[in-house]
Amino acid sequence: MQNTLVFMRTHIITRGVISEFLKLKKSGYDCVLFIDNRSGIIKEDLEPVRVLNFFGEDVNCFLFNEEIFKKLNLPLFANKNKNSNLTNVMWFCADYSFYCIKKYFPSYDFYWHFDYDVFCNGKSYEPFFKLYCDNESDLLVSHFCKLDIDSEWSLLEKSEWIYNNVQKYASFFPVVRLSSLAIDFLYTKRVEHSEIFERIKNNKLNRWINCELFVPTELLNNNFTGENIEQPLRFSPEYDLNEERLFENQDNLIYHPVKGNFIERLNKSEKVINRIKKISISIFGIKIGFFISRK
């Protein structure tokens, strides 16, 4: 078996998330729960790498925070250049999570990343991982493809400052595997790009590059290898599943996105609705109606 680390990234802790993480652990690979702890999900002041107990299960955890981000000296850019909110940065640049994980777990040859709202409709991810246990590609990712020169993919917009005369590639990031060498290379490229972008970021015609364009384009243009995940992710509506997250008929396919906490979200929606009040006024004989939200 390849020397591989699997990590799931989440900003919430629910029975559904932990259930899915435990299914990853059944793969036989080392597994880590990447917890974005900037909102204080874990209240204690702990070291980044810890074993925590959730719902009676011991879980290997990596607690991400702003200090870790600063230590890596990663560029603080996102979709809108003036928006340096770290939440937006980590969403727009999902490759950053690989750099963070590798800093604290450096001894692996490959690293798998899963979003918290990815769902395997089976009892474990072992059948999925078996498809790639002998694959040595630097990049494994869903919806990987070479882009035509006249492609209208939205993520290509404002990328000419760095990708003007190169072959561009697309990908989809809920499930991604990168080699250790690819991670190191991409980290160096992000830092190099930031030095250029810092000088031109105020020009509205330029935009920081999203991970789904940046990762495959950089790797495939620099002698790294990449392949499409054979089993494509199934786009789903926002399924709300039980704590075990199993459909009635198990097909061992991967679904995304899958949301949890249906009752909690329904209750929040009802509270918002109850705060809404309709107001009706008349201006110059014209009746105008609108809604306001009561605190």
Image (cartoon, rainbow, N blue to C red):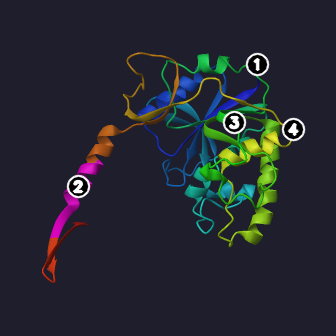
Identify the element where label 3 is drawn.
strand
Q: Which residues are magenta?
A: 268-279
Identify the element where label 4 is drawn.
loop
Residue 204 vs residue 60, the one in the foreground? 204
Judge whether 34 appears above or below 204 on screen.
above
**Residue drawn at the location 86% of the way across and 42% of the way down:** 222
Sequence-earlier tag: 3 or 1: 1
Could you tell me the amino acid type at mark 1? Asp
Sequence-earlier tag: 2 or 4: 4
Left or right: 236 in relation to 196:
left
* The C terminus, quarter of image: bottom left
Q: Which residue is mark 2?
A: 273
Residue 116 vs residue 138, the one in the foreground? 138
CB under 8 Å between discs 1 and 4: no
- Residue 95 appears in the picture as rendered: no
Could you tell me the amino acid type at mark 4? Asn
Q: Which residue is mark 4?
A: 223
Q: Residue furthest front?
A: 150
